[in-house]
Image (cartoon, rainbow, N blue to C red):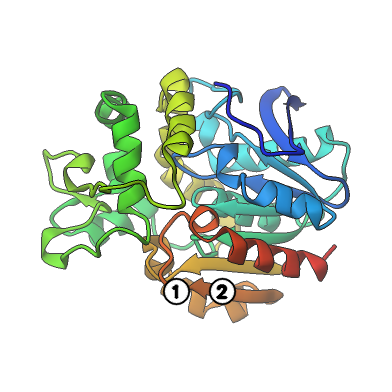
Amino acid sequence: MNSPLPDGCRSHVVDAAGTRLHCVEAGDGPLVLLVHGFPESWYSWRHQLPALADAGYRAVAIDVRGYGRSSKSLEVDAYRMVRHVADNVAVVAALGAETATIVGHDWGAPIAWTSALLRPEVFTAVAGLSVPYSPPSAFRPLEMMRAMAGDEEFYVEYFQEPGRAEAEIEADVRGWLLGFMFSASGDATPPDPSAGTIATIPHGARMRDRFQRPDTMPRWLSDADLDVYASEFEHTGFRGALNRYRNVDRDWEDLAAWRSASIDVPALFIGGDRDGPTVWGAPAIAAFSTTLPKLHRSLILEGCGHWTQQERPDEVNDALIDFLGGVS
């Protein structure tokens, strides 16, 4: 698992209050903690690390627990949201800092939002990519997802049974990653609604049955990039990564005290107009004036799919640096 490091970056492992977390960092200055989503790694931030370092920040991208070179607990509940928040707090301390701006994409966005919600004295500013902030609600998540999926299974429900999605993915890790990542990108052909999307799975089918595959690799994902992701998961498997999904109802219970709570630190949101979580999250975005009262900007990138910081690195870097200039 020797992922190529961008120029000026270094790789190391920290002891985050007993949890081993792998970090790749660059630069000096105010700390910016970068948290990836599924199915990714620190490598998802390869375009941001040098840019943030050049702008005068200490940028640190972690492998979230369950991924890459970080700890991989066997218990499903070790991946509950409050454990991820605790990891982030402990990483900041292990890096010798007291505060940080936290930036997350995909699952990393709810992890970042919740870190700022629960520990605003540590995470003094927050940026979320792809998944807008939505306060814990009164409704159990899996019940809402089942309602959204109609006669099919929402992908989060499909991921619930340990071993089921793992068997599909690990039969062809590289091929599955390519199909999943391309299908969720802005380069994929918009699906015919009557034919379904990769967000839902017919009962008895596989997620990969609806994947699109590129004739040539997209400009934002080279063969070498895909090899990095595939190599990581060939070593680690997908159990830890998928266990995050298996805690959505547990998180709802853990965070009951924060239902309808706003995040009261400076915030930034970046999404794509062809990204499912951003599109589904339109009501959450419309509520930002209440839920993110210190919102700096909500930026929707035209033609951008799910892999925000990889598909549109220059625009994301400019937006992050502009945001950081006002909070650091």
Using the rendered image of the protein, determine whether residue 161 is visible from the camera's viewpoint: no
Using the rendered image of the protein, determine whether residue 224 is visible from the camera's viewpoint: yes
- Residue 246 x/y as whole percent: 40, 38
How would you rate the neighbour count of disc 1 (Cα within 10 Å): few for under 14, some for 14-19, many for 20 or more? few
- Residue 197 x/y as whole percent: 22, 56
Please state if 244 lies on the left or on the right of 296 as rendered: left
The disc labelled 2 sits on which kind of residue?
Answer: Leu
- Asked if 186 appears above or below 158 in the picture, the reply is below
Count of marks placed on residues: 2
Badge 2 marks a residue whose secondary structure is: strand
Q: Nearer the viewer, mark 2 or mark 1?
A: 1
The residue indicated by pointer 2 is: 299
The disc labelled 1 sits on which kind of residue?
Answer: Glu
| Residue 95 image-quadrant placement | top right
The residue indicated by pointer 1 is: 302
In this rendered view, identify the residue nearer to me: 94 or 307. Answer: 307
Q: Check the image and name the residue furthest to the front.
A: 216
- Residue 55 x/y as whole percent: 81, 58
Residue pictured at 62% horizontal, 50% vertical: 47
Q: Quadrant of the C terminus?
A: bottom right
Badge 1 marks a residue whose secondary structure is: loop
